[in-house]
Image: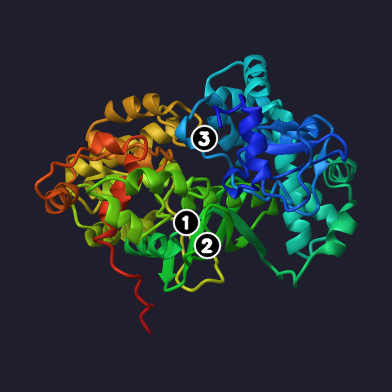
Amino acid sequence: MTPTGHLDTEACYRAVQSRDRRFDGVFYTAVRTTGIYCRPSCPARTPSAGNVTFHPTAASAHSAGYRACKRCLPDATPGSPEWDVAADVAGRAMRLIADGLVDREGVDGLARRVGYTPRHLGRLLTRELGAAPLALARARRAQSARVLIETTDLPLTDVAFAAGFASVRQFNETLREIYAASPSELRGRRHGTASHGAVTMRLPVRTPFAGRRLLDFLAFHLVPGVEVAAPGWYARTLDLPHGPGTVRLELADIDHDGGTGFVTAEFWLQDLRDTAAASERVRRLLDADCDPRAVDEHLGADHVLGELVRATPGLRVPGQVDGDETAIRTVIGQQVSVAGARTVAGRIVAEHGRRVESRVPGLTHLFPDALTLAALDPEHLPMPRARGRALVALASALAEGSVVLDRGPDRDDVRRALLALPGIGAWTADYVAMRALGHPDVFLPTDLAVRRLLADLGGSAEPDPDLWRPWRSYALMHLWNTLMPDTPAPKEN
């Protein structure tokens, strides 16, 4: 494939002919004779080359007048891995649209976040993604509505507004246009039993997916009150635009080679308008849009990393559900052990986090927001004074907006803004870029554990991290993975 918005027609058609699941979500196939669009791996008979066009997004196919295939559900796919690899304006805008930003702040708010005028952003997204911001947001609303229809017993009127539609009429018309079915017809087709009081989703991820080791990483770093974990599952609180929520994830290895797998997520949301934001943020945490085959093929050929990659295919870089939280936790963990950082973070949460009610035992608080932490006296924080001052300075920058970690700004601009703050060095700025901004090509040469591991693994040949580009963040995870303990069972009371 060529960069986003410039699809190679011949390469796309070859992928469709072979039903190559690796390209699900990378592009969509629209068939003129049927008026539908599909994912590349759709099991239906392959149409002739003269009858198809290719689109970089589902919204582009919608805008061209096509409706979604009822057989392969093309909108239920991971997003394009190029959005994080290139991290260009189109990719950053797509992340914000998926989070529901257009519904909350409009196109003007989206344009402001990525640093463009609304008119120029519209032209750019139409050129690169085949649809303008409103059309992209409309496609996201339709997908959210379908998930709510199929997984809850909510009245359809409530579904309409929870998904972000301005009116029931708009909701009905959009679903008929995209899915060729009314909301009530979609509800009649659902399989299984709807959850009561919760929204249960199957979040799409590319495979292979090393879910067990992702769980081990999250469990090793969890903050008491905010997160809990046990073998097979992880749960945490969520600070969402319209209110608090919680999520419980079932995390296991998924071995399918190159296709789409699913992680079951059960959400409890105070306000169902946060459905899209909650699911998108959890998918960031899972690194769901990573192309693991591309990563593993590249790193697996390296003489230092090869055995590690083959031992754990599909290893992910854990992302985040809140960039501000990730940055604050990174500063808390500077120059202390992981256990020490967990203890300090837990004390700060207990003293300054908002209490929440949760159906998951152990989830008691939201992580304190930047505005709350910015108002604290660094002298009274349970850490050395210099680190306390760095934490408060960072929180102040996040609260006032001089540092923004929502994946909207350019990564290099964010790094410069972080390094300008007192007490923030290159290790912290780069770790934040890797976890909070989803940067796939971060390396931490000063990390003591990494240096020791490279010395042990390299043997007589000196490792060359530059050979691991553009996937050095995944190389780091493979190195750290050798140190990660298994997730312990919860202690009995």
Q: Is residue 256 left or right of residue 414?
A: right
Which residue does the image show at 45% across and 29% down from the upper left?
401
Distance in Å between CA atoms under marks 1 and 2: 7 Å
Q: Label 2 amino acid? A: Val
The amino acid type of the residue labelled 3 equals: Glu
Nearer-the-camera pick, 173 or 289: 289
At horizontal 35% and vertical 70% (from top left) the residue drawn is 487
Q: Which residue is mark 2?
A: 356
How would you rate the neighbour count of disc 2 (Cα within 10 Å): few for under 14, some for 14-19, many for 20 or more?
some
Residue pointed to by mark 1: 366
Q: Between tags 3 and 2, which lies in front? A: 3
Q: Residue at x 71, y 27 (%)?
A: 131
Q: Nearer the viewer, residue 352 or 255?
A: 255
Residue 451 appears anywhere in the view: yes
Q: Is residue 318 above or below residue 4?
A: below
Residue 70, percent from left and from top = 81, 52
Residue 101, visible in the rendered structure: no
